[in-house]
Structure formats: C-alpha cells, structure tokens
Image (cartoon, rainbow, N blue to C red):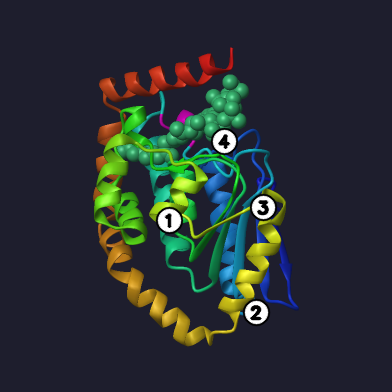
C-alpha cells in the first residue's frame, strides 16, 4: 500500500480524494511518481470512480515540483528512468477519463504547477504567501514542450511566453487573473468547494464529457506519446551537462541558504 499518497474513495458519490503526503514538500521523486501512477491507475480502472480531487496533506505546499535531487549527480540511466516516470504522470493525468480537480492548498512551483494544470479545474487557497507557476528558467533549466503546451492550453500563448521566459511564480490573485487557476477560496473551504464544484461536473453525462475532453487534449497528448524516447534522450542530454548541473547546485544552495 502507498505511503506517499493517501486515497479515499467514496462509492456513494463516485469521487476519490487523493492526498499527497511526502514530507517535507511533496517533491516528485521516482518513488513518489511510481506510487502516484499506481494509485491513479487503480482509480481509473474502477468504473464507479468518476471524479478525483487532488490535494496536499503537507502544510503550505501543494507540491514543490520535480525532486531536484533526482536530477542532480545521477547517472544518465537513472535520469532516463526518472524522466519516463514524469512523462507517465503527465500522460495519465492529462488524459484521465475522470473529472479531475486540483485543490491547491499551498505553493505549487514547476512540476507541482504542471500537475495542477493537467486537472479539469483548479481551486487555490487565497493565501498571498503561496505561489504557483512554471519557474524552470530560475533554475537555469527549460520547461519541456509538453509543460509549455499544457500551460498555453490553459492561459494562452502570450501569457505563457512571458511567464516561461521570466520563470514567473504568481500569487493566487495574479494566477486567477491570468486564468492559471479558476477560483480562490479561503484555505479552510478548499475541499468543500472542490466537492461542490465536482457535483456540477458529475451532472454531465460521462461519455459526452469524456469525448469532449479527449477532443480538446488529444493533439497535445499525441505530441509526447509519439515522441517519448526522443524526449527522454533530450532530457538526459540536457540535464547531465556540466553547466546545467552547476546551475542546479547553485539553486539547491540558494534553497538551503534561504532557511539559515
Ligand atoms: N526538490 C528537492 N528538494 C526540495 C525541493 C525540490 N523541488 N523543494 C524543496 N526541497 C527541500 C529544501 O531544500 C528543504 O530541504 P532541507 O530541509 O534539507 O533544507 C526542504 O525541501 C524544505 O524546503 P523549504 O525549507 O524551502 O520549505 P518552504 O516551506 O519554506 O518552501 C517551497 C516550500 C516553496 C516549495 C520551496 O521549497 C521551493 O521553492 N522549492 C523549490 C521548488 C522548485 O523550484 N522546484 C522546481 C523543480 S524543477 C521541475 O519541477 C520541472 C523541471 C523540468 C525539467 C526540465 C529539464 C529539461
């Protein structure tokens, strides 16, 4: 059974709540991603499960994104294995037949933002200290094309172009303004709001909604699905470069220093 992800399924409503609980900050390690995909697959196969709410059990953070330690000082083979798991998470979530709602109860940089962006609807806690966005360039790395596509599909080309270059991390109110999230609520209302929102989506016949979702997302999904190997190679070549490893080390040092 999973330790990093807690799933509660309510058969009477057909809705599952997935709580990310990988201390301290729900970073997406290979182990985490593997557990995540297994949990998701189980729900996906259960036809009585129609909706999924994803939230965090860690304070102040939804997910810190990809585990930087999985990209630092690791062998090319291991990096490749890691990247395949990142791809898998995105492919599964973005193409899910379930109604997916992100209840973003904390900061959500980079891979955390990606995870939220794959959902059908995003509710964020109205806490000005939380931030969300694709901040890859701040680490000296580049958001892959499918991160970029997912963002552009949500907020449009111009907003994405600027946000990705600057590595913008938005406050909740800024995120709402550009459409990166759909709704802000006080943190203590985030799950009840997600449940209410889910009711509205559940009222739509599944087959019609699923075909519509697929129609909107399939071209984006196919672009990665038909190029997975090349995308892995590209990642491994990039991330194992000395200059990139140096950028990651600098960023890790900044993260540590910020604390002291
Ligand atoms: N990976 C690994 N460790 C992390 C990460 C992470 N993403 N984020 C935080 N940590 C560690 C910290 O170093 C710290 O460790 P320690 O306790 O040993 O000092 C611990 O987690 C707690 O972190 P904080 O003290 O910073 O916790 P706060 O609650 O103050 O802040 C934040 C939480 C806001 C999440 C903050 O930690 C933060 O900003 N983290 C960095 C987030 C980030 O920039 N992630 C980007 C990851 S890259 C990515 O997801 C996509 C990459 C695409 C690859 C493309 C290449 C081609």
Work out whether residue 70 can be spotted.
no
Mark 3 touches mark 2? (CB < 8 Å): no
Mark 1 touches mark 3? (CB < 8 Å): no
Q: Earlier in the sequence, mark 1 or mark 2?
A: 2
**Badge 2 density bin: few <14, some 14–19, many ≥20, Cα 10 Å:** some
The image quadrant of residue 211 is bottom left
> Looking at the image, is mark 2 or mark 4 nearer the viewer?
4
Q: Earlier in the sequence, mark 2 or mark 4?
A: 2
**Badge 1 density bin: few <14, some 14–19, many ≥20, Cα 10 Å:** many
Report the residue at 26% width, 21% height from top: 243
Q: Is residue 180 magenta?
A: no
Query: Is residue 47 shown left or right of residue 113?
Result: right
Instruction: Using the image as rendered, state which of residue 61 and residue 234 is in the foreground.
Output: 61
Q: Which residues are magenta?
A: 67-71
Screen quadrant of the C terminus? top right
Q: Residue 160 at x, y = what percent?
A: 29, 49
Q: Earlier in the sequence, mark 1 or mark 3?
A: 3
**Res. 48 mark:** 2
* Label 3 secondary element: strand
Q: Earlier in the sequence, mark 3 or mark 2?
A: 3
Mark 1 touches mark 2? (CB < 8 Å): no
Residue to which mark 1 is pinned: 90
Q: Residue 63 at x, y = what percent?
A: 55, 42
Residue to which mark 3 is pinned: 19
Instruction: Using the image as rendered, state which of residue 157 and residue 16 is in the foreground.
Output: 157
Separation of residues labelled 1 and 3 (CA atoms)? 17 Å
Q: Earlier in the sequence, mark 4 or mark 3?
A: 3
**Badge 4 density bin: few <14, some 14–19, many ≥20, Cα 10 Å:** few
Main secondary-structure element of the magenta-colored stretch:
helix
Q: Residue 257 at x, y = what percent?
A: 52, 14
Residue to which mark 4 is pinned: 129
Query: Is residue 125 shown left or right of residue 131?
Result: right
């Amino acid at each position: 059974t999973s330790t990093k992800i807690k799933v509660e399924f309510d058969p009477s409503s057909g809705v599952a709540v997935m709580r990310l609980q990988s201390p301290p900050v729900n970073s997406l390690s290979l182990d985490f991603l593997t557990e995540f995909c297994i949990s998701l697959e189980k729900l996906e196969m259960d036809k009585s499960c129609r909706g999924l709410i994803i939230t965090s059990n860690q304070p102040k953070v939804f997910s810190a994104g990809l585990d930087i330690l999985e990209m630092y000082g690791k062998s090319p083979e291991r990096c490749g294995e890691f990247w395949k798991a990142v791809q898998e998470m995105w492919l599964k979530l973005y193409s899910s037949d379930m109604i997916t709602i992100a209840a973003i109860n904390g900061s959500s940089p980079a891979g955390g933002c990606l995870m939220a962006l794959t959902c059908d609807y995003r509710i964020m806690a109205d806490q000005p200290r939380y931030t969300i966005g694709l901040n890859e360039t701040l680490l000296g790395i580049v958001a892959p094309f499918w991160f970029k596509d997912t963002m552009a599909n949500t907020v449009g080309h111009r907003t994405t172009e600027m946000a990705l270059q600057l590595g913008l991390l938005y406050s909740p109110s800024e995120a709402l303004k550009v459409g990166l999230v759909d709704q802000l609520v006080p943190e203590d209302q985030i799950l009840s709001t997600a449940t209410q929102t889910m009711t509205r989506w559940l009222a739509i016949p599944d087959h019609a909604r699923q075909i519509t979702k697929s129609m909107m997302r399939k071209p984006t999904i196919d672009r990665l699905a038909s190029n997975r190997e090349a995308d892995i190679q590209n990642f491994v070549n990039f991330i194992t470069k000395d200059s990139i490893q140096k950028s990651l080390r600098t960023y890790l040092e900044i993260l540590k220093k910020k604390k002291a």
